[in-house]
Image: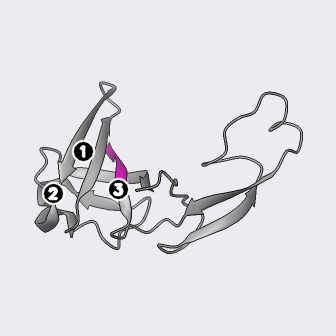
């Protein structure tokens, strides 16, 4: 059974709502990528258009928009999603190998971040 926790943010008023979506509606999100626009009425939500901005899996591993597919991979990065800002280190060439997920949603994803467009 597929279920997702959706964090829907509305940039107009700055409010974020958390909604749980189960099997029939959740199947509409499988195969979508970060940056895709989703119809909110198909998910049973009051908003018309939503854009996928990110997410994480059941272990808390973040999704990254520059990694293709639904896979987990170790990357060497100096900044961006998955690496905290370390005072004095991240600005001066500090790099670290971190585990991240790809940009495609599959059944292993637990939380999806969405932004209201319309």
Which badge, 2 or 3, comes first in the chain's sequence? 2
**Residue labelled with disc 3:** 110
* Mark 3 or 1: the one toward you: 3
Residue 38 at x, y = what percent?
27, 60
**Residue labelled with disc 2:** 43
Say which residue appears at 27% left-offset and 65% top-offset.
Answer: 29
**Residue labelled with disc 1:** 118
**Gap between marks 2 and 3, in whole Å?**
16 Å
Which badge, 1 or 2, comes first in the chain's sequence? 2
Say which residue appears at 21% left-offset and 43% top-offset.
Answer: 19
Mark 2 neighbour density, 10 Å: few (under 14) some (14–19) many (20 or more): some
Say which residue appears at 28% left-offset and 48% top-offset.
Answer: 6
Secondary structure state at the residue bearing disc 1: loop
Secondary structure state at the residue bearing disc 3: strand
Say which residue appears at 27% left-offset and 49% top-offset.
Answer: 5
Whether residue 20 appears in magenta in the rendering, the answer is no
Query: Quadrant location of residue 46?
Result: top left
């Amino acid at each position: 059974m597929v279920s997702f926790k959706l964090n829907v943010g509305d940039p107009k008023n700055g409010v974020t709502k958390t909604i749980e979506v189960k099997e029939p509606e959740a199947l509409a999100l499988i195969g979508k990528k970060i940056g895709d626009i989703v119809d909110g009425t198909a998910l049973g939500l009051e908003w018309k258009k939503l854009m996928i901005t990110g997410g994480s899996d059941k272990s808390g591993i973040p999704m990254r928009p520059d990694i293709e597919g639904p896979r987990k991979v170790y990357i060497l990065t100096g900044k961006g999603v998955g690496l905290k800002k370390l005072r004095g280190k991240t600005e001066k060439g500090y790099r670290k190998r971190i585990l991240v997920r790809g940009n495609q949603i599959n059944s292993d994803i637990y939380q999806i971040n969405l932004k209201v467009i319309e």
